[in-house]
Each structure stands twice: as structure tokens, then as C-alpha cells.
Amino acid sequence: MALYSVSPSVLSSCLKSPPNHHVKLFNKSLPSLSRSRLNPFINKASTTSVEGLTRRTGNHHPNLWDDDIIKNIREQQYEDSHYKESAERLIAEIKDMFNEMPTAKSGKSCAENAFERLVLVDKVQRLAIDRHFKNEITQALDYVYRYWSDCPRDLNTAALGLRILRLNRYPVSSDVLRHFKGNDGQFLCPSTQSEEEKIGSILNLYRASLIAFPGENIMDEAKAFATTYLNQALQRTDISSILSREIKYNMEYGWHTNLPRIEARNYMDIYGENTSWTEFSGNKEILNLAKLDFNIMQSVHRQELQSILQWWKDSDLDKVDFARHRHVEYFALACAYCIDAKYSAYRRDFAKLCALATIVDDIYDTYGTIEELKLFNEAVKKWDSSLPNSVPENIKIAYKAFYMAINESAQAAKKTQGRDMLPYSREVWEHYLKALTKEAEWLANGYIPSLEEYLENGAPSSGYRVTMLQPTLTLDSLLPDKILLEMDYPSRFNELLCLSLRLKGDTRTFKAEANRGELVSGISCYIKDHPGSSEEDALDYLKDLFQRRLKELDWEYLKPNNVPAISKDHAYNIARSYQLLYKERDGFTNSNKDIKDLVSQILLEPMPM
């Protein structure tokens, strides 16, 4: 099985229920555990012999990041005070740009004033420096929203405003795009625009169309039109290489598989090569701040990485040789969206808990026997500090690291939340392990459940919950139980997060898992439910379901409720980071290609100044 699963009763919501379906609590008891010590599919998987017992292994590639690679990085000393002082000066200059923007009394039209504000907000958000300008962005967007009904005089302003206002949780309707759609289905740009300006407008239309809610047909039409238009534009020889790169990047990464520092790194390259852009008033300062901020924060994140490496070494987790060692990759993901220096505890806990959840997943999926899984479950339920001696040493090492990390993370959460969160966290992990055990039973017994049963097991088996909860509790926002229920299980937000990850994951992992003897996936369960259907039929169904539920997820994410924005943003960005890992392949398992490059760009390679 892959690491991430879905929430309970979700199939009925996918197939039968309207969008206001409420998830049911997972309360089914586990069947009696099989006493089998050897998986019946063992001949289909790689095996290793430990103390006379044949065990399945995943043949995972080794850790790509030994200590020498990290220690030999040439430091740029961006933690020195004069770099921070330079950044503060640039921040002050850019704040002045916000504050000096024209108002309705300036003589400029509402559309012009709105567009200038939207463009500046777009720049600082694309370059991941927006955290320095929270008040200024709020003031700018309040102005745009106040005059929104009068502002969108052209497609570019409408598309740019729709996307930015939505992502900042202003309630704006996609109907604004209908004003720019002709009878022939084309979206119209002003005839006074140059060809590159028109292409830029359609690119903004494409970006806006990705932030769609259920039932918004105009967004589907905009996406279809923009996709065709931009693909044709890429075939032209008269557009600049800069614009071509921007189109390719946005069409490849979109919104749901993108992260702030990855986007920032890309746009720093694009903007840096565009002399006409850097010569425009204020843009050079914005770009310089983006580069400087990137390098300053990279220095902070590198220091934190050293502590992650030391933890891994001190915990002896390198001796757990059957499992995936992805602690550096997970830490890089956290740094790609959780940037601020004050959230060190979040990045640390996310990396540790993701790494441990992955190791636990490998114990339950491949390596452990049913008896050992039972002992693991019992130890967690009693919250014992160690496993019995009958359990192999490498599993005991993993359990000890797991036990200590949960306790340490609970202490960090208590400092923020003002109450003991360990019982809540333990309950989340117990549900996770029970569901993993059920998957192990299915495997041991050669049982393929219905798709409904398969998905219903998902909430506690979702590594999403155990990797989201404790890090999010360390952020500087209070989450009493009532508010936790709006973000965590059994909220619809959590249900859809888990479902989107499972659907995406199954389309990427099912073949590799089948080769390891793991026959249960959304693909195999769909085929069981629909005799005569093909693998392609199952993939088409899951992909379509994924796209539909993604819209509902965006609505749950962006709609107003009582959850602090920073908590909801980080919970959602975890899902985006996992979608990125599943973008081309199972990046949780195979991180030696594009994921390796991602780690290098985020943690190891400073931006040239």
C-alpha cells in the first residue's frame, strides 16, 4: 500500500451523496488477526531472511543524502546581520510601493488602480516574500474588492483578480468571466493588446481556472479554452523565450502540485532574464529581496537540517534497512511551503513524523508479520516505551524513535496550545495502525475488498492525519477541540484531503505495488466491482473522481470558517506537497530523480545574486 489513504464512508459521498454530505465516524472493529507468518504472495516480492523467517521487502533505494553531502556545502554566510539589514531596507522600500499606490481620487480609473494593486500582490506572492507584506496586501485587496463590481474592464484584470481574491478568501464569483466570453466560445481580449499581452491574459485565465469550485461550468470552459490557446501559442516562433518558459511552468505545475519556494525559484530565474521586467519601476528591488530572502531562509533551513540528520543518526534509523529513508526529502517539502524562521518546530516535526510514518507503513505493508503488527499496536495502545524482545531489533529501533518523537512533538504542541495534546495524537496513531493492520490482513488472506470497503478503511490509514496534526499544533494559532473538528477528522475538509491523496496515489503506485504482491488498490477494487471493466476504465474513473473532488476540496479550503488561516493553509499545503510527489511517479518511493533536484534547489543551492 502507499503511505496515504482516504477517509471513511467517502465512497458513498463520491457516488451517491450531494456536496453537503457529512462523513461518519470510523467505528468498525477489526476482524480477528490472521496467525499466518508467511504472506501467500511472497513469491511475487523481493524477500530477505531474518532469523530463519522469510520477509518481504520493497527493494527501496538507499538514502541519497549522507552526512558528507550536507556538510560539504559551501556556505554563503547569509545568516550574517548585514544581509538581514539589506533585506529590511528592501522590505521598507516595497512597503512604500504599496502605500503610494493611487486611490480613487487620483484621477486614474478604478480598473487601473485595481490592476496595479493586483500586479504587485501577484509579484510578491509568486516570489514567496508575501509574508513580509501581510497588512499591505490586505489593504490592497480590500480596495480591489470594494470596487470589484466596477473594476474588471478587461479579461486580464478579471482573471488576475478572480484568482488572487479567491486565494485570499474574498467571496468572488466566477461569473465575472462570462462578460469576456463570445458567442463562439472564445474568451476575448482588447484589440489594442499586443500578441504577447493577449497570451499573458490567457495565461492568467488559465491560472484562474484552476481555482474552481463545484458546479462552475465557466471555469471548465475557461480551462479548456486556455489550455488549447496556450498549447498553440507554444508552437509560435514570435513569442519570447521568457513567456514560453512561464507558460510551460504554469501548465506543468498548475496550482495543486506547486509550492511557494519552488514557484519562487522558477520565477526568480524567469524575471532575472527579462531585462524589460527588471527595468520597470520597483521590480529590481522586488527581485533582489526575493533572492536575498531565499538565501537567508535557506541558511536557516540548512541549520535545521543538521538537527534532522543528527536525530536520524542518534535514533539509529539508518539501521532500519528494509524501509524508505526519506527524512531529508520530507524536510525539504516542509521548507518549500513553511518558510518563516519562527516555525522551526513545525518543519522539524513534519520531517520526523513523515519519515516515521513511512517506516511504519513499510513495516505493516511488507516487513512485519501479523503477530509483530499486533504487538506494535498493543504497545501504542498502552503507550509502552519499547516493544517485546521477540520483535526484530530493527523494528524495535523504529518503535523507539517513533515513541520519542511523538512525545517530543506533544511537548512542543503543549507550549502553543496550552494543554496536553498527547492523548489526541495517540488516538490518531492508533486509528492509523489499526487501519494499516486491516490492509495487512487483506494482503495476508489474498482478499480484495469492494471499492467502498477499501475507501472506508481510509481515514485512520491516512498518513495525512498523523503527519498533519502534531506539526500544525505547533503553529502560533490556538486550536481548541471545536475548531479542530472543522479541520481534522471527521470534517469534510479532512475527508477530501485524504480522498484526493488516495485517488492520486493509486493511479501512480498500483503497478509497483502489484509487482510486490500488494494486490489491493483502487484499481483492483473497481475492477472487482465492475466485472468486465479494464485497468484503463478504472484509471479513467479514479482520475475523473479526483478532478471532481479536487474542486470540492478547494471550496472547503477557501470558504470562511473558524479555523485560523495559517493552520488551514499548512494543512492544505501538506496535500499539495504530496500531490507534487505523486506528480510524475511515486515520489515517496522513487526520490532519486526530480525529487532529488527539488531537494537540491530548496536546501542546497543558493540563488545567484
Image (cartoon, helix red, strand yellow):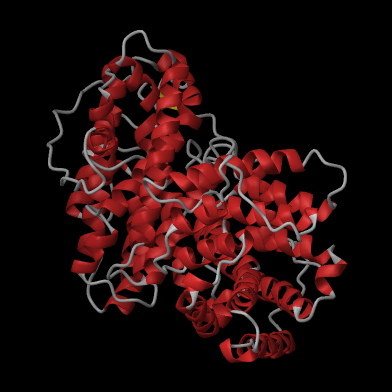
Q: Is residue 549 left or right of residue 14?
A: right
Residue drawn at (42%, 69%), measured in percent from left and top?
A: 170
Pinpoint residue 45: horizontal percent, then vertical percent.
Answer: 47, 20
* Of the pair 411 and 189, the residue shown nearer to us: 189
Is residue 52 shown to the viewer in this render? no
Pinpoint residue 43: horizontal percent, then vertical percent.
Answer: 44, 13
Residue drawn at (66%, 53%), measured in percent from left and top?
A: 203
Q: Is residue 402 left or right of residue 373?
A: right
Pinpoint residue 35: horizontal percent, then vertical percent.
Answer: 21, 23
Question: Quadrant location of the N terminus?
Answer: top left
Q: Where is 354 relative to 26, above or below? A: below
Residue 189 placement: quadrant: bottom right
Q: How many marks?
A: 0
Is residue 553 shown to the viewer in this render? yes
Q: Is residue 81 left or right of residue 29?
A: right
Pinpoint residue 169: horizontal percent, then vertical percent.
Answer: 42, 68
Question: Quadrant location of the C terminus?
Answer: bottom right
Residue that protrudes farthest toward the front in the picture? 183
Residue that protrudes farthest toward the top in the picture? 532
Residue drawn at (32%, 21%), measured in percent from left and top?
A: 525
Q: Is residue 586 left or right of residue 299?
A: left
* Of the pair 337 and 74, the residue shown nearer to us: 337
Residue drawn at (14%, 29%), measured in percent from left and top?
A: 31
* Of the pair 327 and 237, the residue shown nearer to us: 237
Q: Where is 224 relative to 511, above or below? A: below
